[in-house]
Every structure is written in C-alpha cells, then in structure tokens.
Amino acid sequence: MPILTKDTLEFISRSPDQTLRVGARLGRYLGGGDIMALEGDLGSGKTVFAQGVGMGWGSTTRLVSPTYVLMRRHRRHQDALELYHIDLYRLTTAAEVEMLGLDEIVGSPGAVSLVEWPERHMGLLSDDRLWIHLRILDEYRRSLVFQAQGERHQMILNSFRQELTGQ
Ligand SMILES: Nc1ncnc2c1ncn2[C@@H]1O[C@H](COP(=O)(O)OP(=O)(O)O)[C@@H](O)[C@H]1O
Ligand SMILES: [Mg+2]
C-alpha cells in the first residue's frame, strides 16, 4: 500500500458504474504522451476503469479486454491522437514488446497509453506516469490509489483531484 502524499489520491469505488465514471473524468484530461499504469489483481477493475477512461477521452470504439491481443488502438473524432490499451498479462518475452513496437508507442507525443499489468515489463514505462493501484475490498468495493510521478502527471492528478474532491 503506497503512502498517501500530495502526489497520491485514494478513491473508494462502490460499483462498476462508479469506477467507469471516475475513469471517464480522468480520461478528459489525457493527451499525447500520457501514461496510465493500471496495477491490481484479476477482477480488481483495471479494464472497467480503462473503459471509463476511453469514454471520457472520446474514443469512437469501446475499450474491451485486450488480453488476447496485448494491445488495441483507439481513436477519437476531434484530433489525430491515438489511445493504446495494452494488457501485459500474457506477455511471455521481451521480444514481444519489441515486435509490437510498444517501446515506440508508450510515451510518444501522439499516443495516450493505458497499460494493464505494467509490472510485467517495467522497462516500458518512463518515469513520468500516473500509477493506479486497484484493490478488491469486497464484492463491489474497490480501492483506487492514484500516484503521480513526474511533473506532467502531477499536474493531471492535481486537476483530477480538484474535480473529484473540490480541493
Ligand atoms: N467497484 C467496482 N469497480 C469495478 N469493477 C467492479 C466493482 N465491483 C464489482 N466489479 C466487478 O469486478 C470485475 C472487474 O473486472 P475487470 O475490470 O475486467 O478486472 P481486471 O481488468 O482488473 O482483471 C467486473 O466483473 C466488475 O463487474
Ligand atoms: Mg483486464
């Protein structure tokens, strides 16, 4: 469990719908180069949260679990930005990361990246990122801890915190 500091925000979600809505709020702030690392056990809500982010960001396609393909690309109408939904759960070799060109995508100026199971390939993420720890509390409650690293993602977290808590 991370220590709660000014770079950290904790939110308790009470339903899948609430997780979607919180994700959607965050999604509105995301632009090129932004990286969201979604860490948590199976069923903790990483994909549900990512779906909300996609909605808030304005994706023209629904985010689904990318588990079997490792990566799915999404777009939106208003600009040429792309959103990459990556799931490293089934990643077996570092060569796969290279084959998919993930290194060139994550953090690049034209791409927003959402990475499930980021701890499976830490080398993929730059130090400037928003780390989101999801934890199962009980059947419907999930703890979401947002931890910003780097100036850029601290700014995102500040705006998001303000919207979420009014502080
Ligand atoms: N508060 C909640 N937030 C998100 N998902 C929840 C919540 N409560 C129950 N769930 C359920 O937990 C599951 C989360 O699935 P998913 O997002 O695919 O997890 P992950 O991608 O972390 O493996 C879904 O079946 C969802 O309905
Ligand atoms: Mg998932």
Image (spheres, grey):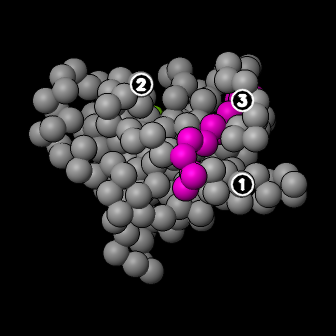
Kind of residue at badge 1: Asn
The label number, if any, that marks residue 95 in the structure image: none
Q: Where residue 165 sits in the image (x, y, percent)?
A: 85, 52
Q: Tell me if mark 1 has few (under 14), some (14-19) or many (20+) residues whose alpha carbon lies within 10 angstroms of its own.
A: some
Say which residue label 3 marks: 143
Front one among 61 and 148: 148
Q: Nearer the viewer, mark 1 or mark 2?
A: 1
Instruction: Mark 2: give few (<14), some (14-19) or many (20+) Cα within 10 Å.
Output: some
Query: Is label 2 or label 3 in front?
Result: 2
Residue 77 location in percent, x, y?
Answer: 42, 78
Position of 41 relative to 34 (above/below): above
The residue at the point 38 percent across, 38 percent down is 125
Part of the protein shown in magenta: 141-153
In the picture, the disc for residue 119 is 2
First of labels 3, 1 by sequence position: 3
Task: Report which residue position mark 1 lands on.
Answer: 158
Res 10 quadrant in image = top right
Is residue 147 left or right of 139 when viewed as pictured? left
